Image: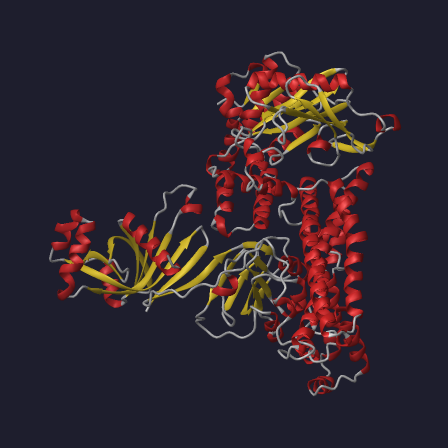
Amino acid sequence: MNFIIPLSRLLEGDRGRVGGKAHALAVMMQKEMDVPAAIAITTDAYNTFVTETGLDTKIMMELNRKTYDDIRWEELWDISLRIRNMFANTSLPVKLHEIIKESVETFFSGKSIVVRSSAPGEDTSDTSFAGLHASYVNIQGTESVIEHIKLVWASLWSDASLLYRKELGLDEKKSSMAVVVQEIISGEVSGIGFGQNPNDPAQCAIESVYGLNQGLVDGTFEPDRWILNRDDGRIISHAQADRSHALYPSDEGTESAPLPADLISRPPLTNENVHKVYELVMKAEGIFGLPQDVEWTLKDNILYVLQSRPITTIYKNDKDDKRGWYLSLTRSIENLKALKHKIEDELIPVLQKETEEMAQVDLSLLSDEEIRDETARRRYIFEKWKNTYWDHFIPFAHGMRIFGIVYNDTVHPSDPYEFLSLLSSGDIMSVKRNNILNEMALQVRDNKRLIHDLKKGDYSNTAFKSLLDQLIASHGDLLCRSNHCTEETPDIVNMVIEMASTPGKHSDAHQESKTREQAFLSHFSAHKREDAADILDIGRASYRMRDDDNIYMGRLKARVLEAEKEVSYRSGTAKRGPSSAGHFDSLSLAVHEPESDVVPQDPEQDFRLQNRQITGQPAGPGIATGPARVIKKSSDLMNFKKDEVLVCDSIDPNMTFVVPLACAIVERRGGMLIHGAIIAREYGLPCVTGISKASEVIRTGDRITVDGYLGIVIIDAEPHEKETGPHIKKSM
Amino acid sequence: MDEISGLKQTIADLFLGQNLAVLSSYGNKQPYASLVAFAATEDLKHIIFATTRSTRKYANLTSESQVALLIDNRSNEEKDFSYAIAVTALGMTEEVRDSERTSFLKLYLKKHPHLKEFVSSPSCALLKVTVQKYYVVNRFQNVQELHIQ
């Protein structure tokens, strides 16, 4: 086995074990083009690592927890996070470690390094994993290089590459990864040259930014863009960027810095340099025989090739290729900062204003024609915000993920989800709502007189009434099905009485959050701490918005349904005011999410199938056993009893007011960052997500055990002995 | 294919590829496990095996007819944790009746022709387990129960 091959000595026959990127760089180096000094860590090294440490088995176990078709992309992200943590926390076998260490030290002798992926089959004219596998720029010190090699290896199992590999039908069992360890060239100007413009085959294109290429590649900085005639390199057009910042190497890694005034006003490339890049791109095409996508950097007037790969035909021809969408889920920190500002300061205030304006309209005063127009207008507004939800709110969820990765890379926790405990700040709207409910329950607890009065419909107790009014004023839209909340008040009060019968569960997650925050920030040097705090801030905003956006959208839905109800009333099909069906059953935010199929009855009369133990994803540590309460429509929530297990297809934050009563949560949708998992974390409840057909295979009343450590649900449809109350063992 | 038919097919495929089952019997306040060569009826309602009457398992079965049988396709490699399937059959054991012996013996010997002499011995009993329930475990921790009415 050969773990290390310097590019200068790499042979054609090595391609299969060094990957296309390393091979292309070696060929160009051997053709005397300016390529940074580099070595390839072969797939033999990867294979030795995963085999000798047993990681290969663990990876396959992770990937085979469920059938692939049952795994949502959010679950894939969780799987890839767990795998990434396994790589980060597993040491290299001693001999492999020694060989890589010695090679890195001998070859680079203390220089700053770039660690790039180079998976075999990664870059061909039919596939492009560009942006799906990891690369790390400006890594210092041999041990850090080795840590980053492991992270590049782990990126073979990133969610985006898993999805893409599956889409291409590539066999994951045969997947392997080589790595290019390359000396960093900190160019004054960098960019990408496309040998052929995807929109016009007679043209080529050159993009350029000041500083390092990373800012251009990850979409943080807009580049200047030149379109050239492919035949002779004549510049056809030049689109100037709005230049303000550039990415430069920092102590370790990179940092964004403002450009000086003279660079802001000057394009990064002169026409002469544009032509140099054109010649480089054409030379690469001459070597490889196909139009190339070439990353380059310019330093001291030398044009270096950082990597070259064929332009992917599938990317431009196949409209069904979802790669772009996968990539859109991965946002840079700069991008997320801008998105946070847009969501918090622009979108949410407008959403709230539009919802409030609707609430001010007395629908009963509108003519029949006006109410029809108003309903159509509200529907239109809802659809508009639904698009915003998908285009802005959902991608912002990546803020939690990016924080999770920074946290795991910094703290190296054994639990890859430990980072979630920092995100909880107790100020998500659904928890605030539940806190009011809990206060009401506290008043009722042990006050038999008040319980008696409430059951009779007497809500005159001043303190209780004050809280009830506060609840209805702030969250009435979400708990009730009408603006005035009169007809549903008994439902809420009954819920409060139910809550009062058991010691209240508080969300005290934010205390833990504060403690862990200090520990996390202490890992950073003083000048890096502010950046770390910024990422934590994005993570927290993302966590908060993940829940709150549904609450805001729920309020808007309530206004749409209110108008529809008025139309129905006037046409004589329904009563004015609240409906018996819940708000949230009829307007869905889902556009990608398929509805769960109803399981048809099996015709095999002599046989009966019972799911006994189902594997999902662990989403909240702890074990609890209790009777299941399957929520198929929102009105089922009002029957929820203390210490039942909340089982549903998809939890909406508008439904989570019953969570303080629950002993555990089971959800069909999978993922650590879905609402069920978030609220379970807030209350320290065992939670398992990703249980296929949960609301079909589990029936209300089934005694079920939720193992939130292992992500399994055990259904005991035929209990051997009658037990009373829940049996809960949990810890956080 | 519906879910029950799919599960039955999984069990049938597994049985087709396996010759031996682990039989769990019980006697003298002690569970006892032994390997037996088995065959299953096409409808999966019965599992047939043979044993001589002097064995401990036969003695156990005469005092406690409820048994468990484990049939699996493990390869003793790490990939088993992802890909192996194990089926546990619970049921009641009895010697096949004379009226059904011909058909069950034919079924049994079709799968284990080399055991003809053994089964034909007067000291050997041909037993059938009437299966009440199958537990099917795959993907390490997924468990489904198939109840036979």
Q: Nearer the viewer, residue A685 or A121?
A: A121
Residue A396 visible: yes
Q: Position of residue B72 (x, y in %)?
A: 34, 50
- Can you tell which quarter of the image residue A140 is in? top right
- Tell me if A132 is positioned left or right of A543 in this view: left
Q: Identify the image quadrant of residue A554.
A: bottom right
Q: Which residue is the extreme one toward the top?
A: A32
The relative height of residue A269 versus residue A512 in the rendered view (above or below) is above
Q: Residue at x 80, y 34 (%)?
A: A242
**Image height check: is A128 above or below A359?**
above
| Residue under the image location 77 percent in, 39 percent down | A524
Q: Residue at x 59, y 46 (%)?
A: A77
Say which quarter of the image contains residue A276: top right
Taking the view exactly as shown, the residue that stands out farthest to the right is: A261
Q: At which x and y percent is residue A634?
A: 61, 70
In the displayed structure, does residue A723 sit left or right of residue B90? right
Q: Is A626 or B9 nearer to us in this picture?
A: B9
Residue A170: x, y in percent? 48, 37
Residue A339 coordinates in the image, percent (x, y): 75, 46
Can you say which quadrant of the picture contains the C terminus of chain A? bottom right
Q: Residue at x 75, y 22 (%)?
A: A187
Question: Is residue A35 visible to us here?
Answer: no
